[in-house]
Image (cartoon, rainbow, N blue to C red):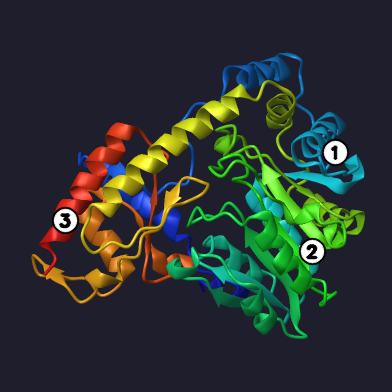
Amino acid sequence: MEILSDRLNRLSPSATLAMSQKSSELKAQGVDVINLSVGEPDFNTPDHIKAAAIKAVEDNWSRYSPVPGYPELKNAIVAKLKKENGLDYKPSQILCSNGAKQSVCNAIMALVNAGDEVIIPAPYWVSYPQMVLLAEGTPKFIDAPIEQDFKITPEQLEAAITPKTRALILCSPSNPTGSVYSKEELEALKNVLLKHERVMIIADEIYEHINYVGAHASMASFDDIKDRVVLINGVSKAYAMTGWRIGFIAAAEWVVKGCNKLQGQYTSGPCSVSQKAAEAAFAGDQKCVEDMRLAFERRKNLIVKLAKEIPGLEVNMPQGAFYLFPKCSSFYGKSADGRKINNSTDLAMYLLEVGHVATVGGDAFGSPECFRMSYATSDENIIEAMKRIKECLAKLK
């Protein structure tokens, strides 16, 4: 009998990975697909980081590492947090994992009991609610529409908190919207959270360096709530190291010990060679980070300009990350070539199969009135993709 666990049956497959897979299948059939569905930089890992990995292989860094990561990497992360963020952490407050995705899941699994509520602003990254379900918790969503620049208000947060609330997951800069919380906005949320001592804050800052407003603000910068913040970051986005799989948490020691216990039982420490590469990323020259950020900013301006020229789309100005999340609900109920668009998933499939541009419907992100495009691709691809999208949407009547 083919019986999967109830735990697994509660989960939905990743919509972003599913759309990327569909795009790859069409490409394999010879279709010229432009993929705007994938959330990863299109740049190669910088040479000095690759050189550190090659040296690590030659120097035989091939054994199991300590579960929380090598001391040298943890020290490099401590130094980064101090230099770039003004945050004081000890190496014992750092745990390195197989990507920031595992870091988020570690935190949720370590903190959430069956029946606990976890507040998740919508739009949200597709995996947050699934991880909460995996921990037998209850996702509780706060709608933050495009009219609010996709950011929740202190009043909304206060109204969402109940005696069952265990955590708030906050992603800034945001996937899927590119919205960024200012220090003043975070402080207003922090003042609400101070009144509710049981509520932890999982602060996903993986897009920290892809920021177009000049300064990254962290919830961990407020001393009166820092001990309740689990800061999540890694090397994937800033250093174009998605496949190296190195993320970390910085948190109170009791949280780190709990995550260490959990990770010790189901993956152990992350890849030894990747850790040495990540150490070089954090400790080395940061010019590569700024070069990539400038390229993303140029692309952001390009895709926003082109999207605003498409009738029927409502577009905001992202302040970080590499996503555009336009409102597209004006097309719902319309048809072309015998295809009716009922929702954003239909729209994304229409754009893929007719326009040969891969995007992701907003349903998966908790915002069914929008869809997500990644502009982590070349200017030429962006221009051609937006031309195709404009032509496709113009057919809908």
How many other residues sit within 10 Å of disc 3, few (<14), some (14-19) or many (≥20)? Answer: some
Q: Secondary structure at mark 1?
A: loop
Pair 3/2: label in front: 3
Question: Is residue 210 positioned above or below 373 on the image?
Answer: above
Task: Compute the Cα span from label 1 to label 3.
Answer: 53 Å
* The residue positioned farthest toward the front in the image shown: 184
Quadrant position of residue 8: bottom right
Mark 2–mark 1 Cα distance, whole angstroms, equals 19 Å
* Res. 268 image quadrant: top right
Residue 366 image offset from top left, x and y in percent: 47, 70
Separation of disc 3 and disc 2 at Cα?
46 Å
Visible residue check, residue 24:
no
* Comparing labels 1 and 3, the label whose residue is closer to the camera: 3
Contact (Cβ within 8 Å) of mark 1 with mark 3:
no
Instruction: Name the kind of residue labelled 1 in the image.
Output: Pro
Residue ID for mark 2: 110
Q: Earlier in the sequence, mark 1 or mark 3?
A: 1
- Judge left or right: residue 392 versus residue 154: left
Label 3 sits on what residue type?
Cys
**Residue toward you, 394 or 275:** 394
The circle drawn on residue 66 is 1
Tell me, yes or no, if residue 298 can be seen here.
yes
Q: In terms of secondary structure, where does tag 2 sit?
A: helix
Residue 190 falls in which quadrant of the image?
A: bottom right
Picture residue at 61% right of the left edge, 23% below the top: 287
Point out residue 224 in the picture as x, y percentages from the top left corner.
Answer: 87, 62
**Viewer-nearest of discs 2 and 1:** 2
